[in-house]
Image (cartoon, rainbow, N blue to C red):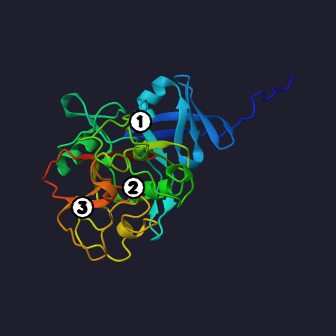
Amino acid sequence: MAQAHNTASSLKLTEERTFTAHLQGRKITGLEVASEWEGLTKFLHPASGQHMIVLMAESRIVTGSVSLMQSLGHDDQQHWVTVPERVLPSGLRVPSFQYAKYPCSKGAGGKIVLSPSEKPWVNIKFAAAVDACTAAGYQLARESQELAIRLDVCEQDINWAGGKVGQGKVFQGLHKGTVSSAQTADFVSSDTEERSWHQLSNGERVYGLAGNVYTWVHDDIQGNESGLIASAFAKDSASIATAPYPSKQKGMGYIPESGTNWSGYALVRGGCWDVGDYAGVFRLYYVWPDSDYDSVGFRCTTPISL
């Protein structure tokens, strides 16, 4: 009788790795790496055939399938700039984040709209601005984030009227009284010194950092849990020590002195359309949080959490 042979094949095990993308409280599971090239990684979602391409160093989506982007709430990215991670002169590390290109506008039902052609949402109290940001899945801009983006701006030749860092002034936006109210981001002043945009080190542009309208800021440096100022400015506080030039010089705008105590108030930054050299990229002031003015709006941010 012929001897029976074991014809069973040897078991082969392969390791499979998938990723889950998290963004703005949403997630997509089952993503696989399809290819990699010079810091860019293409992730494929085999179940749907959709994809996204991520700049890994910044955890930032560059492009992708429309429906996949919508599922992650990423379909409005043209309204955001990515601010690179940096360490402030004080030693404070500020992680990379996304910053709305323009102050928020008011849409139907009191919802945030991000648009270069809509006027800023003003006459809004501090807590209401916080709530509007939260309802949209964002957060009110943090003081540490404001310092990071403004310092980045000051380091770029293109943002200086003289064409080189330190020459002339950093553009101060609408500040000379050429208008009598807050304007849209795409408004162009008749005065060329009132240019409204600034460019970041990564080439992205942001509008309204200086002049036009103040914006509420959540103070995460000397503030309390609610983001309101809770102590006087220490001499080495990043809030007053980050600007590369003194108060009201080189387009910085007004910066308070150490020891100034605005406890109980809320920070605002930027300046409005008619405050002259008090406006600037590092302009820092205070407003009672329960007040609402036609010169104070707000801006939202979102952490990069992929």
Residue drawn at (35%, 32%) of the image: 115
- Helix, strand or loop at mark 3: loop
Label 2 vs label 3: CA separation? Answer: 26 Å
Q: Please tell me whether residue 290 is drawn above or below residue 88 in the rendered image.
A: above
Disc number placed over residue 79 in the picture, else none: 1
Q: Please tell me whether residue 52 is drawn above or below residue 57 in the rendered image.
A: above
Residue drawn at (41%, 64%) of the image: 249
Give how far across and how far down residue 92 sits, in percent. Answer: 44, 67
Q: Residues within 10 Å of mark 3 (few under 14, many from 20)?
A: few
Give how far across and how far down residue 65 sits, in percent. Answer: 52, 25
| Contact, mark 3 vs mark 1 (Cβ under 8 Å) | no
Q: Amino acid at mark 3?
A: Glu
Horizontal side of 210 relative to 83 (left or right) equals: left
Residue drawn at (36%, 72%) of the image: 237
- For discs 2 and 3, the disc positioned in front in the rendered view: 2
Q: Please tell me whether residue 214 is drawn above or below residue 50 in the rendered image.
A: below
Disc number placed over residue 225 in the picture, else none: 3
Residue 219 occupies which quadrant of the picture?
bottom left
Q: Amino acid at mark 1?
A: His
- Helix, strand or loop at mark 1: helix
Give how far across and how far down residue 54 sits, in percent. Answer: 57, 39
